[in-house]
Image (cartoon, grey):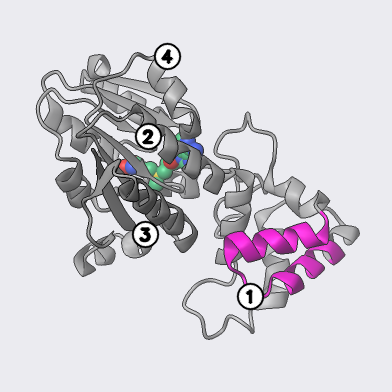
Amino acid sequence: MEQIIHIPVLQKEVIQYLNPKPNENFIDCTLGQGGHALAIMEKTGPGGKLLGIDFDDNSIKDFETIIKNNGLEKRINIICDNFANLKKIVENNKFGPIHGILFDLGMSSWQLERGGRGFTFQKNEPLDMRYNPKTVLTAREIINQWPKREIEKILEEYGEEKFSRKIAEEIVREREVAPINTTFRLICILKEVLQARYRQEKIHFATRTFQALRIAVNCELDNLGEGLNAAMEVSPPGAVIAVISFHSLEDRIIKEFFRANEKTGKINIITEKPIQASEDEVKHNPRSRSAKLRAGKKI
Ligand SMILES: C[S@@+](CC[C@H](N)C(=O)[O-])C[C@H]1O[C@@H](n2cnc3c(N)ncnc32)[C@H](O)[C@@H]1O
């Protein structure tokens, strides 16, 4: 099978702002395929440690193999958990002193291509969308069981979808005919409502609906708020918190978080403006187009 590798976004810039040095310790809250983690570890040898967290135990398996093959087991601790629990994870693992914390939000190319959980509208997969199958809510449940108004609300809030009411109406009508269990069935329904309306848009007509469902299923915005607050609590003075977001809802939360903590004298924002990918990076990795990096140094 073709090897699909997640290309880490803004890698050079992440390293510039985290500025890892020999024997320093870092937390990667969104380990994924470990691209950023490896780049950090290259700079923190011989003794620097990394605490790598990811909620999706499947997607970090490849990285566990890389770690073993490179004899890095002693320097990295991989934890499958929600970064909303960051404080407890740090305490349980007695990890420190911490020099920096990275969040690279959303999902990886691996999850899109190989996850098999319905993150992509390019493949016919079960409508699941959970990062971690131990959590309860699935996209299938939202689509088939939630009231029309609730579906409309998440499409509007989390997808910023202009046609949320029309989509919700069509979903409710179609689920009466037969349960909507797969990505392709949902795509067919969306196509009916949206294809003509999205003709002039650059994005695929299903993008906003899929984003909204993923955010709702994984409580992404709540987790982000909790994760950032926990990062503040566990960071000692001088530690850098760096966050990469991929859409305006996330970026708004991050901007507010840094501004509020700067106001109270707890953090120094070190990215004057959000850092975005260069034209060259976007050419090589289209996923980086919407990425924004913000970073602050704990006072
Ligand atoms: C964009 S990928 C990270 C890619 C990684 N930086 C790399 O270089 O390979 C985001 C990762 O965050 C994980 N994730 C999303 N929400 C999470 C959460 N609340 N807690 C822990 N991990 C989460 C996803 O499972 C995914 O693997």
> How far apart are the alpha carbons under marks 2 and 1?
34 Å
Residue 243 at x, y = what percent? 34, 47
Q: Quadrant of residue 297?
A: top left
**Tags 2 and 4 touching, CB below 8 Å:** no
Q: Quadrant of residue 196?
A: bottom right
Q: Mark 1: is the Cβ under 8 angstroms from ligand 1?
A: no
In this rendering, position of residue 6 left or right of residue 239: right
Which residue is label 4 attached to? 92
The answer to whether residue 294 is above or below residue 53 is: below
Residue type at mark 4: give it.
Asn
**Tags 4 and 1 touching, CB below 8 Å:** no
Front of the two marks 3 and 2: 2
The answer to whether residue 299 is above or below residue 44 is: below
Residue type at mark 3: give it.
Arg
Mark 2 or mark 4, which has the lower sequence index?
A: 4
Q: Which residues are magenta?
A: 147-173
Which residue is label 3 attached to? 287
Near mark 2 (Cα within 10 A), the count class, few <14, some 14-19 or many ≥20, is many
In this rendering, position of residue 41 left or right of residue 65: left
Front of the two marks 3 and 1: 1
Which residue is label 2 attached to? 231
